[in-house]
Amino acid sequence: HLDVTFAPGSAAQVLQRIKAAAETGEVEVRAAFDPALTVAEATQIAQALALVDSPKVKLNGRADGQLFFRAFLPSVSWRERQRRLTQPFELTIRPSDSELVFIEEDWSVEGDDPKLTPRAIPFDEARQHPKVDTCFIFADREMRLSRVYSEMQKLKDAKILNWYVFEGK
């Protein structure tokens, strides 16, 4: 088992460390993202990790309060609410504040798709929606992960299992 931390300016060295470990056989890697990284830097690192994730280099798990590397690689189509299979919370983080949105699905309308009604809710209300176990985070590409982690902590009682980070709204 190999625990690695990606910090600003360290990606090449950390990837080299993973590669060296893999030369001795299969290696299980748990990657952490330093809070000083920006969303854009974390996304670039996640793209590199996706290339090395293989039967020989298994990227598994995440440290507490951290994001799994694939959280930075969401499907672009998920930006459109109508194209999602389920409706996650949407957390928009701006420089001075943040907003949590719950999307209500009304299946009583005609047709095959529900009517979607987004509604801003207080963070502590999130736990009242136990069926929602995913949160999409929208943050500026230059935002530090420390801010993202801080906002994620506001949802610690909501039992979110899946987190995805999108650059921008």
Image: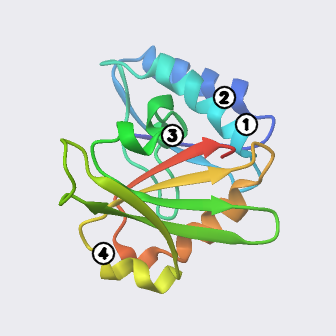
Residue occupying the point 75% across, 42% down: 141
At label 3, which amino acid type do we have? Arg
CB contact under 8 Å: marks 2 and 4 = no
Marks 2 and 1, how far apart at CA: 5 Å
Residue occupying the point 67% across, 69% down: 98
At label 2, which amino acid type do we have? Gln
- Quadrant of the image containing the N terminus: top left
Is residue 39 in sight in this rendering?
yes
Viewer-side residue, 40 vs 103: 103
Ranked by sequence position, the earlier of labels 3 and 2 is: 2
Ranked by sequence position, the earlier of labels 2 and 4 is: 2
- 3 vs 2, front mark: 3
Ranked by sequence position, the earlier of labels 3 and 4 is: 3
At label 4, which amino acid type do we have? His
Assign a secondary structure to mark 4. Answer: loop
- Residue at the far top in the pictured view: 23
CB contact under 8 Å: marks 4 and 1 = no
Q: Is residue 45 above or below residue 118?
A: above
The residue pinned by badge 2 equals: 44
Disc on res. 20: none
The residue pinned by badge 4 equals: 129
Q: Residues within 10 Å of mark 1 (few under 14, many from 20)?
A: many
Q: Position of residue 65 (x, y in %)?
A: 51, 64
To which quarter of the image does residue 26 belong?
top left
Residue occupying the point 42% across, 84% down: 125
Q: Residues within 10 Å of mark 3 (few under 14, many from 20)?
A: some
The residue pinned by badge 1 equals: 41
Ranked by sequence position, the earlier of labels 4 and 1 is: 1
The residue pinned by badge 3 equals: 79
Marks 3 and 4, how far apart at CA: 21 Å
- 4 vs 1, front mark: 4
Left/right placement of residue 103 relative to residue 138 reads left
